[in-house]
Image (tube, grey):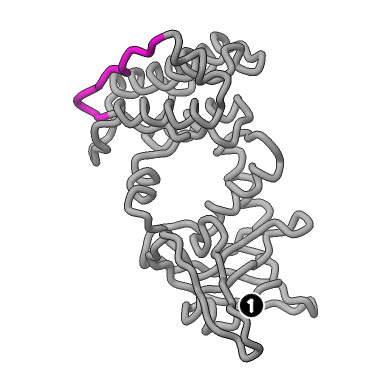
Amino acid sequence: MLLYRLSQVEYASIPPVRACSMHLLRHNVPRFRRFLAACLVTVLLAAQAAALSPKDRDKLFEQVWQLIRDHYYDPNLHGLDWNGIHERYRDKIQNSTSDEAVYAALKQMTGELRDAHTRFKSPAERQRALRRVATTMGVMLGNVEGAPTVMDVEPGSDADVSGVQPGMILASVDGQPAAQRLGEIQRQAGTSSSERAAALLGYFRLLDGPPGSLVRAQFLKANKTTLDVVLKRHVVSTAPHLTTRMLPQGFVYIRVPPIRACVF
């Protein structure tokens, strides 16, 4: 489920929900999440490039908070004091100095639910998801024994040409230790339903950046030596793509890419 920013100049109301529908949805979590996502789409009209005004920030915050209060599948909100959360995060929103700070606060607020399927996405993140594209430096990371480990390398990418290989551990990004950078990202993103889910969200953002920008990365090899590279971020499609070929033994090889492969 995704939460979206409302239009800066126009707002749409959520369509009324019949009690019987909500009763059924609350007992069918997958259907509920699809329903709530559809409601959120009706709320989103456009992602404006201009900065949010203080009034827009307040209205965005109130609609996100109320949407969760009124339509979350668990009416008890996992036992959270949602009114208390409203007061705490309203102060954060009002004291925010940028739109990015507003989005970070909304991510933290939704993270209070500790539900990896209930997240807030900024306009840029949402638009990128709709286009089914992502920015990558050609490396996919995963959590192996608590370390950000290279799981896959995009063939022909700068990372591939520079010698980055699966199994290497990301040690630093632009001179900052990867563990430190990951901790900052996870604090900004808020909590999730599990440590594993929080780590995956952090890995997704660890190497993210504008297309065309450069990133200095250091990788640790199995023999404890390091590989220092400068890689250029580029845009790739996130649409599922199957790879098939016939093996000499007569078997058919089918490679199903992992979810969100090559988006780091």
Is residue 17 a member of the stretch shown in magenta?
yes
Q: Is 41 on the left or on the right of 257, as rendered?
A: left
**Is residue 182 left or right of 122 when viewed as pictured?**
right
Give above or below for 132 relative to 109: below
Give the residue at x 36% y 67%. Answer: 212
Residue shown at the point (48%, 68%) measured from the top left:
242
Residue 101 relative to residue 75: left or right: left
Amino acid type assigned to the residue bearing label 1 in the image: Gln
Look at mark 1 in the image and give the residue it sits on.
165
State yes or no: residue 140 in magenta: no
Q: Which residues are magenta?
A: 7-18
The residue at the far bottom in this view is: 248
* Rendering coords of residue 62 (x, y %): 39, 16
Main secondary structure found in the magenta portion: loop
Q: Position of residue 238 (x, y in %)?
A: 43, 59
* Furthest residue toward front: 250
Asked whether residue 102 is in view, the answer is no
